[in-house]
Structure formats: C-alpha cells, structure tokens
Amino acid sequence: MVTPMADESRRKHALAPSVFQPIDLTAARELAQSRAKLLLVDVTASWCAPCRLMDATTWRDGAVAQWIRKYAIAIQVDSDLDPSASGLNVKALPCLIVFRDGQELDRVVGARSAQELLCCLNGLLERRPEIGTLLEDNDSNVSVRQKLAWRLLHEGRHEEALREWLHLWRDEKGQESLYPGLVRLLTEEYPAAQVAIEIERELLADMRHDFKALRKWLCLTHGLGKTEEILEWFDNADNSDFDRRLSDLSLRDARTARSIEHVLQSTLTEHNRWEQLGRILISAQLQIEEAWQHCLFQQVLRSAEENNRWEDVDRLFMESQIEEGRLGVRVDPSDPIYPSVLQSELLGEFRHNVAVLVRALRAAGRHAEEQRVVARALELDRSPEMKAALDEVGVFTAASTSSQGQEPPP
C-alpha cells in the first residue's frame, strides 16, 4: 500500500528539475557505481527559499545539465519527506552531497549560481574539494568567508570555523543578522565557542546605547537563546524614550532599525508582551505587505510546479534580492502571473501575522494604525478565515463597542 508520504514524495520527483532522476538514494548509489559516475544528492525542502532559487535557476541551466549527464547521477532528497535524509546529517539547506564509489567526497552548503556550482563540480573532478578553493580565495571577500565558515563547521573544523565567524562578525561589511544559526551550531558543537561569543557580547553590553552595537548584541543574545536577558535589558530601556528613538532611527537607517525590531518582536511575542510590542513596532504596514507577497509567491511556485512552467519564476528570482536572510520576491498585480486565487493553507501564516500585529497595536493604544492594518488585511483576504482570525483578537467586538461610544478594550 502506498502511504500519503510516498505519494507526496512521488509528486515532488515528478516536478523536480529534469537533471534529477526519480529514484531513491539506495537505487541512485547502485546506479552511480555501476556507471562509474559521481552521485549528487541535493537535500532540499519545500519551505527553503534558496532551494527554490536553485530549482528555478541553477538546476535548469544548460551547462549544469550537460555536466551532470556526462559525469554524474543526480537525485533530490526532501529533508521532510524522505526517510533517507535523516542519515545524511544535514544541518543547513540547500546541501549538495557528492559521493564517489559510495564514499562522501564533498558538500556544497548554501545556494550557488550555475557558474559557482560548475566551478565546485569541476574542482571535484580534479579531486579538489570546494573548501580548498574557498581557502585559496579567502581574502576580504565577505561572501567567500561566509561559505568557508559554514564548510569548516560542517567538516568539524570548529576552531577554524570560529575564527572565520569572528572575522565576519567584526567586519563592517558583514551582515551580522545572517549569523544566529551559525552561532547556535558553533556553541552546540564546540563549547569553546561559547567563551569567545560571550566575550563579544560583553564588549557590546556597555555600548547598547548605540543602535548598531545594540543590533549586534541582540543578534548574539537571540542566537544563543538568551531571551530572558533581552527582556531584562528591554525592561530597563523601556523606561526611556526607546520607542521614539527606534522610530527616528527607521528614517535614517531602516536596515538597522528593522533588524532590532525583528528580534524584539520575536521575543516580546513569545512572552505575550503585547503592549510593549505595540509601542516599538515601526513596520506594521510593511510587514502586512511582505507577508502577503510571500503567500503570492508560494502560490506562483505551486502553479509553476503543477504546470511545469518555470520561465516566469526564473524571471522573478532574477529580479529578487536576498537580504536580511530572506528572499524578497515581489509579484506585481499587473504581472500576468499574479494569482487570482490563493490556496487557503498558504494564508495561515499571513492571518497569524495580522492577528499578532493587531493585538499589539491595540494594546499600545495605536488604534488608528490598528484600523489601517485591519482594513488592508481584509482588502487582501476577504475570507471567513481572515475574519475569524481577527475576531479571535477581538477586532469586531472592539468595533462594536467603539460604535456604542465606548473606548476599545485593551
């Protein structure tokens, strides 16, 4: 009997880029050995935006396809659906694992363009793993250092990985908001890293009046899972005019302000601190638009998979940017591929995000902004489920009370 998971796995195989063969890992190992070829195992997941980026671009590139036909057998393994994924010890996606004669030869972690991937693969033909190339090219290039830090960590070279991370962390060009995951893995696998990271946090603690230093301290503290320390600091900072200063910062340095807001929003939401969250929100309207765009793009991807039409998705990816750890893709209403209908399950996160923002804004007494968020949410999603999500946080109850001449409840 075919299980639902097997059905879903087969559907994924059918929709995968044509370079990947619709066989499981065991069969792929046998086929690669019988043909004396390399085995490429691309570990992916439906929720992984960089994985989707490679599916739409790199894995559909003609030169990549030609290389694979000549030198390798390639398969995709879904980290959520395929039981064989658990034995591959993958810590970050996308992850391409290369085998020769049944033995692991190398790993390529993170999204790669077609040119970058071909450089890695050609190096492997010369028995030169990617890490060797990264070490040779490792100078002031932030992107190369990022990849090298992850590779060193995955290979268990923890002291070298920590050294690269520290260099990235102290580099003004480094995007420190991208490194909490690396912080967590470093401290989990290499206890000595905890000491070095704590020293960095201590150096920043006395400079938290400066927003750039605060951003770094929050990033480290959140990465280490020390949310109680964030709350303790916030309770002290909250007695000042922190919310006004953060709002002013957003006009001068939106990137730093939003990074601070992101960590505080996650922490305050986790601890149900709605009134405090409502006071520091600086991007409620923008968050609504971003959450909606995420839903739109997921629907576009589904349609592309179901109809095997990747040209428009390829174009959207080429027009997008990866910033702050997120893939920012915008689907314009005038675009022919703008979805006319969104599948309901895609909207669950959007409705949850709306409810969080509404609850926080109301608790802080920012009723005009709350009403704008509600109006925009209902304009985008008129479904009974959206209205039910708003009703759960008392939107319609508050509106009814207000219409009777009373103040909305906190």
Image (cartoon, rainbow, N blue to C red):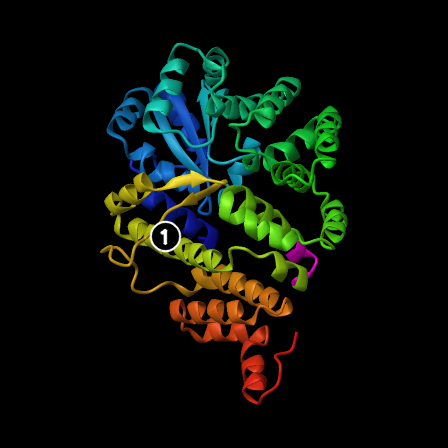
Q: Is residue 22 visible?
A: no
What residue span does the magenta drawing correspond to?
A: 268-274
Q: Residue furthest bottom?
A: 404
Vertical position of residue 53 compared to residue 66: above or below: below
Q: Is residue 292 left or right of residue 70?
A: right
Q: Determine the image quadrant of residue 183.
A: top right
Residue 295 at x, y percent in the picture: 41, 57
Residue in view at x 50 percent, y 48 percent = 251
Residue in view at x 64 percent, y 57 percent = 269
Quick one: label 1, few (<14), some, or many (20+) residues within 10 Å? Answer: many
Residue 62 at x, y percent in the picture: 24, 29
Give the number of callouts.
Answer: 1
Residue 276 at x, y percent in the picture: 67, 60
Question: Which amino acid type is marked by label 1?
Answer: Phe
Q: Determine the image quadrant of residue 243.
A: bottom right
Q: Is residue 66 left or right of residue 320?
A: left
Is 293 or 261 nearer to us in this picture? 261
| SS for dot 1 | helix
Q: Is residue 277 visible?
A: yes
Vertical position of residue 143 compared to residue 22: above or below: above
Is 198 or 119 nearer to us in this picture? 198
Residue 364 at x, y percent in the picture: 63, 66
Which corner quadrant holds the C terminus?
bottom right
Identify the residue under disc 1.
Answer: 297
